[in-house]
Amino acid sequence: MTNQKWRNEKEAYAELHFMDYLFDNGVSVPEILPSKAGKWVENVTGGYHASMFTKAPGRIPTEED
């Protein structure tokens, strides 16, 4: 969740788009889950944006990382 005063919907979507790119290219980041309406960002009560993710796969970083 992000307050709409800190990041507008377009900025939130841009961040998620970059995360999706990283996920699609094998980086260990969580997958973005769409809402029931099929959206990555939903406006919720109280002036917030909400997004959902899977649990990020974890591992111990290597020197190569």
Image (spheres, rainbow, N blue to C red):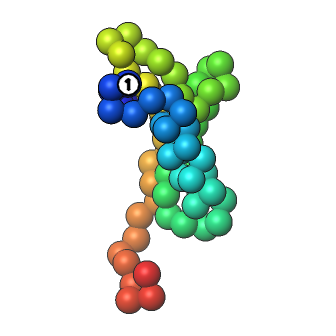
Asked if residue 43 lies left or right of residue 22, the reply is: left
Query: Residue most toward the bottom?
Result: 63
**Which one is nearer the viewer's eye here, 53 or 20?**
20
The image quarter containing residue 39 is top right
- Where residue 50 sits in the image (x, y, percent)? 44, 27
Q: Residue at x 54, y 66 (%)?
A: 27
**Which one is nearer the viewer's eye here, 3 or 19?**
3
- Quadrant containing the N terminus is top left
- Where residue 64 sits in the image (x, y, percent)? 45, 88
Local SS, label 1: loop
Residue 26, above or below 1: below
- Where residue 43 sits in the image (x, y, percent)? 47, 18
The image quarter containing residue 4 is top left
Q: Residues within 10 Å of mark 1 (few under 14, many from 20)?
A: some
Asked if residue 37 lies left or right of residue 8, the reply is: right
**Which one is nearer the viewer's eye here, 2 or 53?**
2
- Where residue 65 sits in the image (x, y, percent)? 43, 81
Q: Residue at x 55, y 43 (%)?
A: 14
Asked if residue 1 lies left or right of residue 27, the reply is: left
Q: Residue at x 36, y 16 (%)?
A: 47
Tell me the residue that label 1 is attached to. Answer: 4
**Which one is nearer the viewer's eye here, 56 or 23?**
23
Q: Residue at x 39, y 33 (%)?
A: 7
Asked if residue 41 lies left or right of residue 56, the reply is: right
Picture mark count? 1
Residue 53, above or below 48: below
Amino acid type, mark 1: Gln
